[in-house]
Amino acid sequence: MERKTNISAEDGRQDLVITRLFDLPRPLLFTAYTDPEIIAQWMGTNVLKLDNRKHGSWQFETTDAQGNVVFRAGGVIHEFIPNQMITRTFEMENAPFGPQLEFLEFESLPDGRSQLRMHIIYRSVAQRNQQLRLPFAQGLNMAHNRLQEIVGNLK
């Protein structure tokens, strides 16, 4: 499978940059990150809370067939500029990673396309490298492919 989501991680740094081009207009791409029903579809998770505003918060949870929680994450929204930017923290529960800071920027491109740029800062180089050793890139690419497919059908 072609990986359309690009992850740039320079050696010795505690951050990474993720970019992805979408065949979606910027407002629809932004909606994919702010509408609980759409998030649940492309991420395959339950949106327990999503308060899209400055000083708002969010929490997502994924369960297995027996109802056991297999993933729970949440954070605080520090900046929310509709159709442009979301700055938030991200922290997984019961994981060996600390919180990270995420800057999501949404850019309009010609021909009704858009680009997502995520700048993620970790507490340390070691934490960032630990994240990258997981199937993080593959999972994010698959999720973004689902986002394109699901939201593309809303056009």
Image: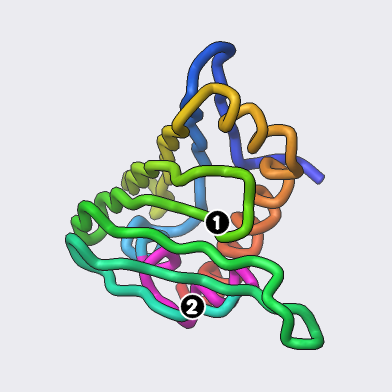
Residue sticking out furthest to the bottom? 66
Q: Amino acid at mark 1?
A: Met
Bounds of the magenta segment: 31-44
**Which of the two discs, 1 and 2, labels the residue nearer the N terminus?**
2
Number of numbered callouts drawn: 2
154 sits to left or right of 131: left
> Marks 1/2: CA distance?
14 Å
* Residue at point 57%, 73% (across, down): 61
Crowding around mark 2 (Cα neighbors within 10 Å: few <14, some 14 to 19, many 20+) is many
Residue occupied by mark 1: 92
* 5 in the magenta segment: no
Q: As rendered, which of 39 and 147 lies closer to the eye?
A: 39
Q: Quadrant of residue 12?
A: top right
* Residue at point 45%, 70% (across, down): 59
Residue 111 visible? The answer is: yes
Q: Amino acid at mark 2?
A: Val
Q: In the rendering, at what x and y percent does residue 135 appear?
A: 75, 44
Residue 38 circle label = none
Q: As rendered, which of 30 and 67 lies closer to the eye?
A: 67
Residue occupied by mark 2: 47
Q: In the rendering, at what x and y percent does residue 69 appear?
A: 68, 75
